[in-house]
Amino acid sequence: MIIAPSLLAADFGNFAKDTARASKSCAEWLHLDIMDGHFVPNISFGPQVVKALRPLTKLVFDVHLMCSKPKILLEPFAKAGADMITIHVELGDAVMPLIWEIKKLGKKVGLCVNPPTDISLVKPYLNRIDHLLVMTVNPGFGGQEFIYETLPKIQQVNAWRSERNLKYTIGVDGGVNFRTVSECARAGADVFVSGSALFAAHSLKQAVSKMRKIVLQNDPALADLKV
Ligand code: DX5
Ligand code: ZN
């Protein structure tokens, strides 16, 4: 399993400090939400910020592009230090060429699906991706409530993965906290993106360790532990 704290919930005045916190937390990835003010109604940060953070940590940089025109951004984020670049299946015909472009840049490929989007849309790409990210809130903002109706999507992509013996990881993103994480794990997720639940904790390290315990011991009661 992989825990990916989302920098969207960090202190925007002190990304360096919070990146260092995440780095020392025993999380595996750092989730970097890129919003263009068009694909989603919010703007976050760009490749310059990612480049500035790259030397501060060895965490895998998981760049989630919530952008209408990701083509022009792939190379800048690749050069800035992304290890994986995730694009949205809602981009339709643009998806296949984007997947090839990301591969050409030598980066891992992620594909993301929004809550209202039919999960069957990801099917043609499953043998070409490294990571399938299921949005469990409507993208754009941190701190939203988990949408339980997305759980069958996780089950479905998990079933497709075993049926076809594929290797992509399954991530969940949005509203993932110490309570919702158990259901995500039971549905088949193995990558847990979490922003506000982790960064709100006094100790990010203990919060990451608590989330890991809840998943590994399959014990939702651990959610009540103080961190
Ligand atoms: C939402 C972003 C998420 C966000 C999750 O659009 O894609 O990565 O940071 O934040 P929480 O965990 O606070 O819902
Ligand atoms: Zn995200």
Image (cartoon, rainbow, N blue to C red):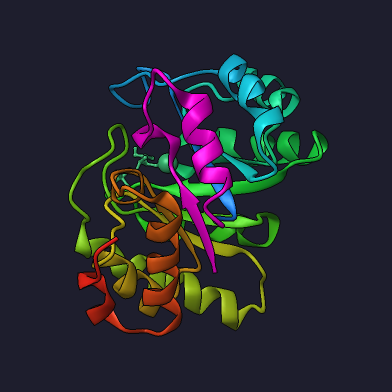
Q: Is residue 217 left or right of residue 128?
A: left
Quarter of the displayed picture in which ligand 2 can be seen:
top left
Q: Is residue 68 left or right of residue 203?
A: right
Task: Answer above or below: position of 165 versus 169.
Answer: below
Please tell me which residue is depicted at 33% across the width and 67% down the height of the picture: 181
Please tell me which residue is depicted at 39% across the width and 17% down the height of the picture: 13
Task: Answer above or below: position of 223 versus 105.
Answer: below
Task: Answer above or below: position of 16 versus 152.
Answer: above
Q: x and y percent of residue 67 in the render?
A: 46, 25
Q: Quarter holding the N terminus?
A: bottom right
| Residue 161 can be seen, yes or no | yes
Total labels drawn: 0
Task: Answer above or below: position of 214 versus 127.
Answer: below
Please tell me which residue is depicted at 30% across the width and 54% down the height of the picture: 136
Q: Is residue 183 left or right of residue 94?
A: left
Asked whether residue 133 is drawn in magenta, I would say no
Q: Quarter holding the C terminus?
A: bottom left
| Residue 71 can be seen, yes or no | no
Asked whether residue 21 is drawn in magenta, I would say yes
Q: Quadrant of residue 184?
A: bottom left
Say which of 147 and 54 sits in front. 54
Write the start and end of the magenta stretch as one range.
1-26
Say which of 166 and 58 sits in front. 58
Say which of 36 and 51 sits in front. 51
Say which of 43 and 166 sits in front. 43
Q: x and y percent of residue 34 in the render?
A: 47, 27
Q: Quadrant of residue 126?
A: bottom right
Please tell me which residue is depicted at 45% across the width and 65% down the height of the picture: 209
Q: x and y percent of residue 25 in the render?
A: 52, 52
